Amino acid sequence: MNTFRNLLIWQKSMALVTEIYNATKSFPKEEAFGLTSQIRKCAISIPSNIAEGFGRDSNKDYFRFLNISISSLFELQTQLEIAKNISYFTTEQFNKQYEDSREVERMLIAFINKIKERQ
């Protein structure tokens, strides 16, 4: 593997970012610097930390960045729940975003465990 772009987990998390951006376009304008911004930041952090960790010299560093990535994912899932609770998402919209985030979560956990084995 010669680039992080070849990692399926990076590709899936990039697709999630795109979905999140599209889904939050309909949020109220007063949320531009609140929940909208926070949700987008968390989503962006997931593939960004996967990529940054990939460029590090050791599995220990990579593991640290993957853990930051999964922490951002859990934060994102919490914010998706908040958006649903305050009716910014319909149940269907929430279910789609949440299930996609869960897929990334499962992949990240498996990838983290693989990196752990190499330490």
Image (cartoon, rainbow, N blue to C red):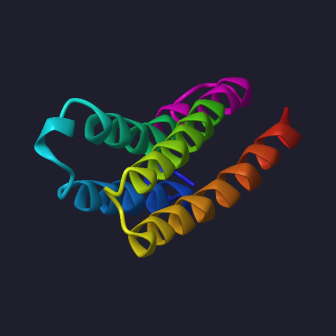
Task: Count every numbered label the image shows and give the total.
Answer: 0
Rendering coords of residue 114 (x, y %): 80, 49
Q: Is residue 105 located in the magenta-colored stretch of the structure?
A: no
Magenta stretch secondary structure, dominant? helix
Q: Is residue 38 left or right of residue 106?
A: left
Figure quadrant of residue 17: bottom left
Q: Is residue 3 visible?
A: no
Q: Is residue 65 left or right of residue 111?
A: left
Q: Nearer the viewer, residue 92 or 52?
A: 92
Q: Is residue 38 visible?
A: yes
- Establish if 63 lies above or below 5: above
Task: Give the residue displayed 76% in from the left and 55% down from the top.
Answer: 110
Extreme-front residue of the structure? 86
Figure quadrant of residue 7: bottom right
Q: Nearer the viewer, residue 86 or 65?
A: 86
Magenta residues, as a range? 51-65
Q: Is residue 30 left or right of residue 11?
A: left
Rendering coords of residue 49 (x, y %): 49, 35
Task: Give the residue displayed 57% in from the left and 55% down from the top.
Answer: 1
Q: Is residue 58 located in the magenta-colored stretch of the structure?
A: yes
Extreme-bottom residue of the structure? 92
Q: Image quadrant for the C terminus?
A: top right
Rendering coords of residue 31 (x, y %): 21, 38
Rendering coords of residue 64 (x, y %): 66, 26
Task: Give the residue displayed 55% in from the left and 32% down from the top.
Answer: 53
Q: Is residue 68 left or right of residue 11?
A: right
Figure quadrant of residue 16: bottom left
Extreme-left residue of the structure? 29
